[in-house]
Image (spheres, rainbow, N blue to C red):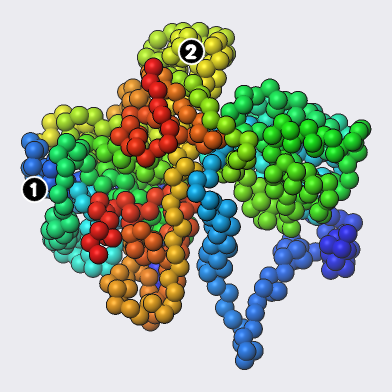
Amino acid sequence: MASAPSKLYADDVSLVVVLVDTNPFFWSASSLSFSQFLSHVLAFLNAILTLNQLNQVVVIATGYNSCNYIFDSSSDLNQSFENGRMPVMCSSLLQKLEEFLIKDEQLSKEVPEGRIKSSLLSGSLSMALCYIQRVFRSGALHPHPRILCLQGSPDGPEQYVAIMNAIFSAQRSMVPIDSCYMGAQNSAFLQQASYITGGVHHKPQHLDGLFQYLMTIFATDLHSRSFLHLPKPVGVDFRASKFYYLLNFGGSFILGNFCFILDIAQLPCFIYKQ
Amino acid sequence: MNNGGARRMNGGGEEDDDEDYVNGDLDAWERTYTDERSWESLQEDESGLLRPIDNKALYHSQYRRRLRSLSSTATAARIQKGLIRYLYLVIDLSRAASETDFRPSRIVVIAKHVEAFIREFFDQNPLSQVGLLTIKDGVAQCLTDLGGSPESHIKALMNKLECSGDSSLQNALDLVDGYLNQIPSYGHREVLILYSALSTCDPGDIMETIQKCKKSKIRCSVIGLAAEMFICKHLCQETGGTYSVALDESHFKELILEHAPPPPAIAEFATANLIKMGFPQRAAEGSISICSCHKEAKVGAGYTCPRCKARVCELPTECCICGLTLVSSPHLARSYHHLFPIAPFDEVPPFSLNDPNHKLQRNCFGCQQSLLNPGNKPGLLVVCPKCKGYFCLDCDIYIHESLHNCPGCDSFRHSKADKE
């Protein structure tokens, strides 16, 4: 077993797991093109790695049909140095991203019209949390992990339970989930995620200045956030304000809310809304 | 007791100075060895060489046993679980609780783990309520009423840890029965008794009390710290609870945390009910209103009951004015994983590891850790029965105990089974 070099992890060392939305249905209709978006994101990732030599970045792609790891700055393959010890990561990241997109498209099947074209956020969140647990297990000295979701696709109601499970697990492990939403409407899931876990949620007004939003809001490490004035949650939409009758079916509890109304055929209960 | 006797022989003059560690004959590092004899867990193989202790596999096999015992009870078609629980924790503060066979004393260990249990309980059952009861000098007293805020229970408990007198099981059960009869019928009534004594001083016939509890549908469980008692076993059998006796502190922690997830509901008693709940809106920033729980004016940052428009400070709670249960959707969402559990992963049998499909996935799907041991030999791994993704043991434990999502199943829109 190779001995790890002794590192002194100060408070401001971060591990940022970035979940990049690659849903083609969203990007084909967005004002910002996917390649422009990638140039903003790559500059941002390089900046994070420059902020502190011990910072780590992991990129997971959230696709329409699948999710996968794209990049890990701490793996041996990415440690090539050039021009003053700046790691060269762009080419490997882009190559793996292209392979992922090709494979994701091959997995496509016929989709009935009218379905919401959401990406698989719950899958990439779960993978990110498993990776962060591995970092926690590696010992007492490790960077402070957080998750950043760069999402544009609308919320998929069928993922509600899985996303809530992931959010509560992140809350227990004290991993903040930041979210930058680039879509048209608001994302209730991401607002809730950032609110519950203590992260920052923002919906940029001008997408062509995305790099500036990323640098000023999402680049700071967790320790320094206490000194900064970051966007606060304003009226998180918990879908409150309505009455729901809950059916206590034989001692178990089945709730109908806006998400489950789609899956009502599977549940042996009825929901009455006043 | 045998346990204390053995330690007396080991410690020499230490027995008199049990409470006074400063003046003990042994140094502190020596004292830890008198309690945990870690050399006893070493094993030798056939040739007499020491076998390395594989903690990870041990831990994982314990976890698998736990999972198997849980899933065996849930194999019935649809197991119903009580999600709105009203649990009374009965803590025995008789003189037996000050015994020092648990370091530093039984009551300190109990208090420490009760605090962890209460937090875990509210984490897994946000809609439920807990109350605390104590038995001291033969009398049962209510320490805190049924409530949904963990801090108030923990604070009340930590103040009152003096032990004296006898223990009385019947008085405790009578008191609990009186309190739990007042709660609505859709709630699940439970009692968890942490019993240190080996006897009980009862004013009447405890069998009658047990029958009364059974008729009131109260599920009584007991965790004993001394030895197994027939009356506790009988109580638990009659009411459908579980009885266990803790062997040491870590076993006690495991036993008490087993009561945090909702138990299967007693099928013949469960009835279908409609429960009215409200989802309050957050009050506007800067609005001034009189808070109904503290009876004073507060600015902003509260919730408004949708029925009577009273202001409450925190959720979940019951509106003081109109009695409506107020929750927010994340509170309910915390309980969803009890209703939609994920299937346990299957262990991968060694003979299938040479099959070509395995060679394609060298890393754990969740954390990307290498699944191969040094020397390219396959390590221990598990596979999800639905998506056929391979996971390492640590991810298996994390996924089933905390995350409740399979990353493989959630990362593929069209399941792999469709393609085969």
Q: Is residue A252 above or below residue B33?
A: above
Instruction: Nearest to the eye among marks 2 and 1: give it.
Output: 2
Q: Amino acid at mark 2?
A: Arg
Disc 2 secondary structure class: strand
> Around disc 1, counting alpha carbons within 10 Å, would you say few (fewer than 14), some (14 to 19), or many (20 or more)?
few
Q: Nearer the viewer, residue A185 or B287?
A: A185
Q: Residue furthest front?
A: B268
Q: Position of residue B231 (x, y in %)?
A: 83, 46
Quarter occupied by residue B136: top right
- Looking at the rendered image, the quarter that the C terminus of chain B falls into is bottom left
Q: Is residue B60 above or below residue B246?
A: below
Read off the residue under disc 2.
Answer: B311
The answer to whether residue B203 is visible is yes
Q: Amino acid at mark 1?
A: Ser
Q: Position of residue A98 (x, y in %)?
A: 12, 58
Give the label on residue A262, or none: none
Read off the residue under disc 1.
Answer: A35
